[in-house]
Image (cartoon, rainbow, N blue to C red):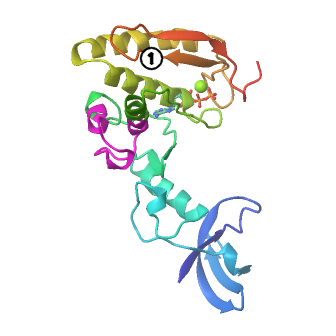
Amino acid sequence: MYVWVKDPSIAGSDLYTKGHILNINANKITVETSNNVKTQELIIPSQDCFHICPEGDVPDHCQLMFLSQPTMLENTRKRFAQDKIYTLVGEILIAVNPFKWIAGIYGVDVMAQCKGKKLYNTPCGPHVYGTAEKAYAAMKRTSGNQCIVVSGESGAGKTEANRQLMNYLIWRGSDAETSQDLTNKIMDCNPILEAFGNAKTTRNKNSSRFGRYVRPPPCRAAPSRWSPPLPPPSHPV
Ligand SMILES: Nc1ncnc2c1ncn2[C@@H]1O[C@H](COP(=O)(O)OP(=O)(O)OP(=O)(O)O)[C@@H](O)[C@H]1O
Ligand SMILES: [Mg+2]
């Protein structure tokens, strides 16, 4: 039987590798790992060995047969290898920056697949548009303000995720005729707003030095507004 264990070749890392169970003794397990260069036998506490999930990926980590850090990482890895950059954990959406443009994952066709759908029920699978749809639907249902928190380290793709969220909300909040025109107008402001104080860093060629507070129009008549830049808490100004 195979299990996930911390990779012994990289001390102190959070990387996992598959190991073959050789022996189980009280609460210690002897596991054999191999990185194709050398094979090692480890004696580790049973709580540091994690079950391996069956083949295939799931769109929501909560659907994993065995839920642990290595099984979530492996599910994310399998999905990423198929250009599925989004995975849900319940209502939270995890996005992995592909650092390349993936054909067909954004656009009006994909937006239409999320319109009126529950987060977990979108034909395109988990998507940032699905998250936007959830906020939009809650706003319509409660007539109250909604908030989507986009978080991640520098270069993780927050600005891009926000751009896609805005794209969707503008598309969703306007009718077919005004939609494209309005979307283009608002999105065309993006490079100008992004230009305020952005800097080239080792992690991101266009790292945001300021946050933006943008209010997309709730109906087709109202213009979009933006407030003076706010510093994101993680970025010293
Ligand atoms: N979904 C995506 N698809 C393709 N490329 C992406 C995507 N998200 C991000 N990228 C690429 O990664 C780069 C960095 O992303 P982004 O600027 O959104 O990071 P950030 O989280 O806002 O970083 P910072 O905190 O430094 O502002 C982008 O310029 C873009 O090239
Ligand atoms: Mg940014």
Which amino acid type is shown beneath numbered disc 1?
Pro
**Residue 97 pos. (x, y %):** 52, 39
Q: Is mark 1 within 8 Å of ligand 2?
A: no
**Quadrant including the C terminus:** top right
Magenta part mainly helix, strand or loop?
A: helix
Horizontal side of residue 10 vs 171, given as left or right = right
Horizontal side of residue 121 vs 80, given as left or right = left
Quadrant assignment for ligand 2: top right
Residue 5 to residue 110: above or below: below
Horizontal side of residue 78 vs 158, given as left or right = left
Picture quadrant where residue 217 is located: top left
Q: Residue at x 60, y 84 (%)?
A: 21
The magenta-colored residue range is 110-134
Q: Is residue 113 magenta?
A: yes
Residue 113 to residue 216: above or below: below
Residue identifier under label 1: 216
Front-lying residue, 135 or 152: 135
Q: Residue at x 40, y 68 (%)?
A: 55
Q: Is residue 130 magenta?
A: yes
Picture quadrant where residue 108 is located: top left
Horizontal side of residue 99 vs 84, given as left or right = right
Task: Sort mark 1 into few (<14), some (14-19) or many (20+) by Cα contacts within 10 Å.
Answer: some
Picture quadrant where residue 14 is located: bottom right
